Amino acid sequence: MRASYDVVVIGSGFGGATVACRSAQAGRSVAVLERGKRWRPDEFPRSIGQVSEAFWEEGRSHGFLEYLAFRTVDVIQGCGVGGGSLHYFNVNVRTAPQVFDDPAWPRGLDRATLDPYYDVAQDMLESAVLTPPAGRTELPARTEVFIDAARRAGQAVEQVPIAVFTGEDRLHPVGGQRQSACTYCGNCLYGCDIGAKQTVDGNYLALAERRHGAEVFPLHVVEAISALAGGGYEVRFRRLDDDPRVAGEVGTVRGAKVVVAAGALGSTELLLRCRDLERSLPRLPAAVGRRFSVNGEMLLARAQGTERQADPGLGPPITARTTVERNGHLMTIEDLGLPDSLLWFLEGAMPPATARARRLVALASTYVKRSLGLGGPRTRVSLEVDALVRGGRTPYALPFLGMGIDSSDGAMRLADGALDISWSPRRNRQLYREMEKAMTEISEAAGGEFVRSYLWRWPLRKVLTAHPLGGCAMGADRRSSVVDEHGEVWDHPGLYVVDGSVLPTALAVNPSLTIAAVAERASFWMTHGRDLQADDAATPVNR
């Protein structure tokens, strides 16, 4: 690592990877510091034993999934070169225009302004609605069940653009890695080992590294940022290397510009530490930590006992959505698939239906009798295997992912040196009532029964989000926000925040594409000092 760079980027997800790429393309020297490790396709977990190693726990495992539990909110987030793209569910949807009408958004930022950046990001991620790969003629059963049920419920439904490759085997045109068509294995949560999933380490970061000289430093956790007297910033980091000879080493690097892109929780915690504990950036705005949002998410709800087999473990995890507006609430409901290993766990954890329980008892009785020489010379176990599967709960389950415009008024703070989150279920109860009504309609139209998320039931009243937002919100002034509409921190020239933490409200859709588009805009402003226009000669190049 050099002593200084033009741009130092902290984090390598959708925000950080985008800024690193565009800065490197503009001829800037770029260093990316990422607390997680770099993952090879063959390292992604597949066995039950390996899954435990996929979760991050500093000092034990450098996994790419981190699950954090707070009083009213649970958060799942990514760590690793590529950030949340390593485990996200591939969806790249544009935020509805009316969301930007909320006065919390800067006046200069709306859907029309972002559309050129959406175009560039969507092209880089190669997002499109699912086309069955060669050898398959149909969409996954879950997709068909969801679309049919939503239509019968009178809800408008459509397939969503997803960053999943379904063509002939190839070398990726940007990253050069081998890509094979999606096999419908459903393992996206645990990483894609065949390269069908388009993750930012294989496009944005690969373009920055392979062609423009950016340097990526995995297992470097940033602990503080300090302003330098002559301009620019010094970043202090600690190494988390697997090699014990260097693990724990502390170092520094300087950047003329520093871009914080460690995610809603990571970026907010870092700035809170710099302001309140390290006192290295004492003039950071008072708004750091405000406007936390769970993106109005409802996970772990489902339709149970659908008429047709949905097989939620088959195919890309999300393929379709319905958009619902009722009683002042904008919501998105999507089909949701889960890895088979997780579904088998849930199958074992759920009590069996009565009919299935009787079949299991009958099978066990027959097997024991015949093993003791009673009732006949042999049994064809293969003919009885369906007693183990038929009547199972998960094949006839249709999980949902719901998102909506929540109150976006949660707060993050440091308590005893650790990040804490407060978010009010009570202020969002009406949103979730409306969301559950819409999910109930789809469930009943599918011939099943709606089952509420276990976390949302009394007495927990918790939500699980994979898309935390806010904490370093953009806005019109330093009294109400942390950064301006281009991501630059108020009164801190050259210090930027560019990730989900800058979004001041929930989006009611998967935020990955919006984060990438906001990062594209911030990057373009850093280089050109203006907005991208239609047919602009300076449009970023993706190949």
Image: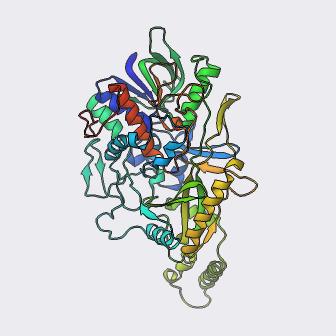
The quadrant of the picture occupied by the C terminus is top left
The picture places residue 165, in percent across and down from the top left corner, at 33, 54
Q: Is residue 201 above or below residue 45?
A: above
| Residue 87 visible to an observer of this rendering | no
Look at 44% across and 50% down and name the residue there: 191
Q: Nearer the viewer, residue 250 or 397?
A: 397
Q: Quadrant of residue 480?
A: top right
Q: Quadrant of residue 401?
A: bottom right
Q: Is residue 189 above or below residue 63?
A: below
Which residue is outermost to the right?
Answer: 459
Q: How many marks?
A: 0
Which residue is outermost to the bottom?
Answer: 376
Look at 53% across and 55% down and name the residue there: 48
The picture places residue 281, in percent across and down from the top left corner, at 57, 18
Q: From the viewer's perspective, is 121 left or right of 497?
A: left
Look at 53% across and 52% down and name the residue there: 49
Q: Quadrant of residue 423?
A: top right
Q: Nearer the viewer, residue 317 or 480?
A: 480
Which residue is outermost to the top?
Answer: 229
Q: From the viewer's perspective, is 270 left or right of 132?
A: right
| Residue 265 visible to an observer of this rendering | yes
The quadrant of the picture occupied by the N terminus is top left
Q: Is residue 430 above or below residue 525?
A: below
Q: How is the image coloured?
A: rainbow
The picture places residue 12, in percent across and down from the top left corner, at 43, 35
Q: From the viewer's perspective, is 464 left or right of 530?
A: right
The picture places residue 331, in percent across and down from the top left corner, at 55, 55
Q: Nearer the viewer, residue 227 or 491?
A: 491
